[in-house]
Image (tube, rainbow, N blue to C red):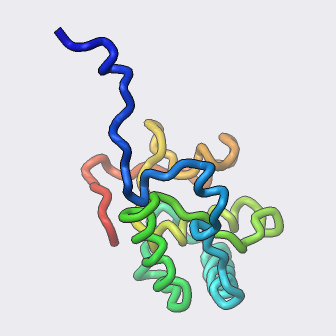
Amino acid sequence: MPNPDSAMALPPHQEVPAAWVRPQLAQRDDWIEALSDSERFELETACDRLTATGAELTGLRASGHPLPILAPRLQCVLSDVLDGRGFVLLRGRPVQARGRRKTAVAFMLLGAHLAHARPQNVQGHLLRLWLAPEQTLDAHHFYPPTQTHHRP
């Protein structure tokens, strides 16, 4: 018969980058990546171009929208996310000054350089949890379930 106390036992202590606790992270800032002026300008220029053309955001691919200054840094960020602590905070793009649409464009473009967009809920929305429900970007937010997530 299983020991009832074993079900409540904590897993063994882990010494890997992804096994962080808040108090440790609060003492450091290596998980915050501040965009440089040139990276921010490149991202804003690309977002302005995508916004002006009315491009379909759900189909964005890095190959179609290169970010030659920012892309190498995003690959380091991806490595940190997948093989390190599991997250990174990108800082330096003022959201309120850009509005929801341009912020969504930036979010999707950055995401296109990190991986492929995947639905975030059973309705297939990519940004619904991030935008107000009445402000989803378009009606085509679903990828076929046969697609798999993989590194670009």
Q: Is residue 67 visible?
A: yes
Left or right of 74: which side holds 93? right
Q: Percent from the top left, x then y, of residue 121?
A: 47, 40
Q: Is residue 40 above or below residue 102?
A: below
Q: Percent from the top left, x then y, of residue 52?
A: 67, 77
Q: Nearer the viewer, residue 45 or 149?
A: 149
Q: Nearer the viewer, residue 74 or 119?
A: 74
Report the quarter where the C terminus lies. bottom left
Residue at image x 43%, y 78%? Answer: 75
Report the quarter where the N terminus lies. top left
Residue at image x 46%, y 85%? Answer: 72
Q: Is residue 49 above or below residue 117?
A: below
Q: Is residue 72 above or below residue 101?
A: below
Q: Farthest residue in the left direction?
A: 1
Q: Quadrant of residue 63?
A: bottom left
Q: Percent from the top left, x then y, of residue 148?
A: 28, 55
Residue at image x 46%, y 60%? Answer: 85
Residue at image x 57%, y 53%? Answer: 138
